[in-house]
Image (cartoon, rainbow, N blue to C red):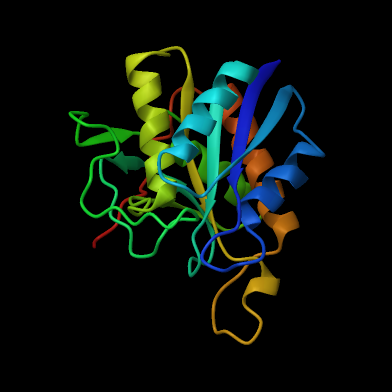
Amino acid sequence: MTRVLLTGFAPFDGERTNPSWQAVRAAAARPPAGVDLRTAELPCVFGEAARALRAAVAEHRPDVVICVGQAGGRPDVTVERVAINLDDARIPDNAGAAPIDEPVVADGPAAYFSTLPVKACVAAVRAAGLPASVSHTAGTFVCNHVFYALAHLIATELPALRGGFVHVPYAPEQVTGRAQPSLPVDTVARALCEIAATAATTREDLRLPGGATH
């Protein structure tokens, strides 16, 4: 069996819940066939989140890592394509830190591409009747920080490991009284299972349109 580590985040920015961790836990309750699914909750704190991820990788020794985070305002599950070496916080993290124009890793490369089959993962989610798309920006907050830290760990220390990042929308209870898109946690969990299964069995990505004009 392929061992897949799914991570989600603690709530942040005054929210009482984080759908990334809710969906990760729900996915772990019904892992796809052939996948040994492990989970870890990461703090929404620069630096500390990357250290927690490294500890989870050391503990579980996965073949694949899929980090998951909340992207409020997005309407679908988005599989991220690229992590950039930049922390630029519009809001403070849960420890009150708000770095501006700082590298995730000093002297690291400007960016890393995901080593997941991004388009194949999106295609699998869509084939299951669920909304998904490719994303070309993971932001500059703790989500991108963790994505870049994971990619740097793979590039410099664990070349056999494969990994990437997935963003998910708000849960319905987060948008009561607000005109924001959302997806039920169960729907997101099903999408994560499709992504985990695809990442576990697919090494060569599909050659399909997935770009953006802006």
Q: Residue furthest front?
A: 96
Q: Residue furthest right?
A: 29
Quarter placement of the N terminus? top right
Q: Can you give x and y, in whole percent of width and height, for residue 11 in the image?
A: 60, 58
In the image, taking residue 95 as reference, residue 196 lies left or right, namely right
Q: Is residue 146 above or below residue 163?
A: below
Seen from the viewer's position, the closer of residues 148 and 79 is 148
Q: Is residue 63 visible?
A: no
In the image, taking residue 63 as reference, residue 87 lies left or right, namely left
Q: Is residue 40 above or below residue 127?
A: above
Q: Residue furthest bottom?
A: 177
Q: Can you give x and y, in whole percent of width and height, for residue 88 in the image?
A: 28, 55
**Quarter of the image holding residue 154?**
top left
Seen from the viewer's position, the closer of residues 16 and 31 is 16
In the image, taking residue 181 as reference, residue 1 lies left or right, namely right
**Quarter of the image holding residue 173?**
bottom right
Residue at 55 percent across and 84 percent down: it is: 179
Quarter placement of the C terminus? bottom left
Q: Is residue 88 visible?
A: yes
Q: Can you give x and y, in whole percent of width and height, for residue 101 in the image?
A: 20, 51
Residue at 43 percent across and 34 percent down: it is: 206
Residue at 31 percent across and 51 percent down: it is: 211
Residue at 53 percent across and 39 percent down: it is: 67
Q: Can you give x and y, in whole percent of width and height, for residue 97 in the image?
A: 38, 54
Give the mark count.
0
